[in-house]
Image (spheres, rainbow, N blue to C red):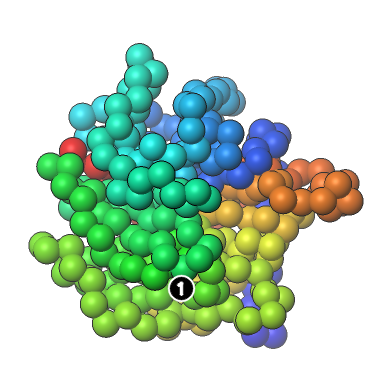
Amino acid sequence: MTDMLKVHAQHLLPVQNLLGEGPLWHPLEQKYYWVDIERGRIYSFEPNTGKVQYDAIDTTVGALGFRSSGGLILACGKGFAAFDLETKDLQVILDPIGKIPDVRLNDGKVDPAGRFWAGSLDRSGNGALYRLDADHTCHTMLHNIQVSNGLAWTADQQTFYYTDTGDLSIYKFDFEPQSAQISNRRIYVQLPADRSNGSPDGLTIDAEGFIWSAHWDGGKVTRYDPAGKPVLEILLPVSRVTSCTFGGPDLQELFITTASTGLTDTQKGQQPLAGDVFIYHTAVKGVLTPFFAG
């Protein structure tokens, strides 16, 4: 660990999100999108013009994906829903959870075949990971989840990475691309039980197959090699680092979201940039996230 490179992210956008999350780069629009979960906001940022804007929906929004037919697929407080960026119309597809107090859909991502995966936040440990197919059928992939979080697939589509923040773990699974079945769960990264390194949150994967994982209450993003060894730390001046994605014309910008929710007044005073967006220019390229086929 002593020879691990440590670098610093740059402050990019003073958006002051409560719970910024789920960033994605839209390659056609050349924009970043992300959400502020607790405010129910869907943000976009156009680097070429510096324009930041957001749309608000009347519920929480945990994650988004781009639809091949246009607009967004959302994992929100009403379940899986389609959002039209032009009309601002929100169409609920289905709700896999129902009305359970303090349980909602959290992070999600589209897999290589265009299926949208998202899991629930249920601190009682009764959460699940769901898969929404292009025909709008829903499949429960995992049970007994606490805080469903970051997901990624390797380029060869043989491995699936998945985070349960509640048990401080990032897992690896064998992935069957045709059936989308997952098996052979094993630990990829296990953070210390004393939370001295924070908790694993959102993540992304680069073109070399390394994972970049945000540390909630850890103030950093860590790059891990395929064996789970940390090789780089990107330090931030805020503790609640939530997720990251690659973007920009060369996919060499790491766009990092953060949160201010739950911080005390003293902590907020110590972290005036909490909830803002940061960036780090990487030496490696990222990979694009597929579009939802439904």
Q: Is residue 187 left or right of residue 117?
A: right
Residue at 48 percent of width and 59 percent of height:
122
The reply to whether residue 92 is visible in this rendering is: yes
Compared with 187, 201 (above or below) is above
Left or right: 283, with 126 as reference point: right
Q: Camera-side residue: 124 or 220?
A: 124
- State the residue lying farthest toward the top: 87
User: Which residue is painted at 50% across and 48% down in the image?
Assistant: 101
The residue at which mark 1 appears reads as 170
Q: Position of residue 59 (x, y in %)?
A: 48, 33
Q: Position of residue 7 (x, y in %)?
A: 68, 63
The structure residue drawn at horizontal position 67% and vertical position 75%, both measured from the top left corner, is 195
Position of 28 compared to 234: left or right? left
Determine the image quadrant of residue 171.
Answer: bottom left
Instruction: Give the quarter of the image for residue 5.
Output: bottom right
Q: Residue at x 25, y 60 (%)?
A: 140
Secondary-structure class at tag 1: strand
The disc labelled 1 sits on which kind of residue? Answer: Ile
Q: Nearer the viewer, residue 248 or 107?
A: 107
Q: Position of residue 235 (x, y in %)?
A: 70, 61
In this picture, residue 143 sits left or right of residue 176: right
Q: 290 or 47: which is nearer to us?
A: 290
**Residue 111 visible in this rendered orientation of the protein:** no
Name the image quarter holding the N terminus. Answer: bottom right
Q: Quadrant of the C terminus?
A: top left
Question: Nearest the camera: 211 or 21?
Answer: 21
Neighbor class of circle 1 (other Cα within 10 Å; few <14, some 14-19, many 20+) is many
Determine whether 276 is above or below 234 in the image.
above
**Quarter of the figure with residue 142:** bottom left
**Residue 108 percent location from the top left of the image:** 38, 51
